[in-house]
Amino acid sequence: MAPPKPTGKGFSHFLATRMSSLHVWIYRLSGGKIGGSAFNAPVLLLTTTGHRSGRKRTTPLLYLDLGSEGVAIVGSYGGADRLPAWAVNLQNHPYAQIQIGSNITRVNATTAGAARKAELWPKLVAMYSDYQVYQDRTSRDIPVILLTPAS
């Protein structure tokens, strides 16, 4: 998975964007056999609709498998004080698509309420401990977003 995108528009932002695009390309080409895990956690591809552009945007993200309930993802943005673009996109267009391995599924996105987040947060931090580092770094409440299969 690509590192969190920097907030600036300099060379590091350019590099992070290119690395993310490369990750998506390799993941798709290999059906998730390459790029399907990072940091000992599973990776999915989330495709959202841009909230301003209307264009499809795909981002590799760590996820927690919730079985028949779908998956949980975290809008951490490396502990930045704002949401990642993909999370803003989901707020405006909650219908999206995920790819796990070679399986593609249409999903509906909702933000977990406080009780559900409290239930999932320890599992998410066990999967990727930096989520707690990111939460400690920012004053905003980092959202846990639930992606459930669309009917």
Image (cartoon, rainbow, N blue to C red):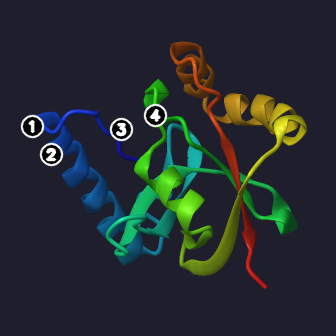
> Where on the picture, by quarter, is residue 94?
bottom right
Discs 2/3, front: 2
Residue 27 at x, y = what percent? 40, 67
| Point 57% across, 17% down: residue | 139
Of the image marks 1 and 3, the number of the one nearer the N terminus: 3
Towards the viewer: 26 or 134 = 134
- The label on residue 104 is none
Sequence-wise first label, 4 or 3: 3
Mark 1 = which residue?
Answer: 11
Q: Mark 4 against mark 2, which lies toward the viewer?
A: 4
The three-letter code of the residue at mark 1 reads: Phe
Disc 4: CA contacts within 10 A as few (<14), some (14-19) or many (>=20): some
Question: What amino acid is labelled 3 in the image?
Answer: Pro
Please report contact status of discs 1 and 2: CB closer than 8 Å, yes or no.
Answer: yes
Give above or below for 41 relative to 89.
above
Q: In 3D space, how far apart are the residues under numbered discs 2 and 3 (Cα atoms)? A: 12 Å
The answer to whether mark 4 and mark 3 are in CB contact below 8 A is no
> For the residue labelled by badge 4, is the local secondary structure a helix, a strand or a loop?
loop
Q: Where residue 110 sits in the image (x, y, percent)?
A: 72, 58
How far across and how far down the image is residue 7, in percent?
28, 33
Residues at marks 2 and 3 touching, judged by CB atoms closer than 8 Å:
no
Label 1 and label 2: CA atoms lie apart by 5 Å
Quadrant in the picture for residue 103: bottom right
Mark 1 or 4, which is nearer the eye?
A: 4
- Indicate which label's residue lies in the foreground, 4 or 3: 4
User: Badges 1 and 3: C-beta atoms under 8 Å apart?
Assistant: no
Residue 144 lies in what quarter of the image?
top right
Tell me the amino acid under the disc marked 2: Phe
Image mark for residue 3: 3
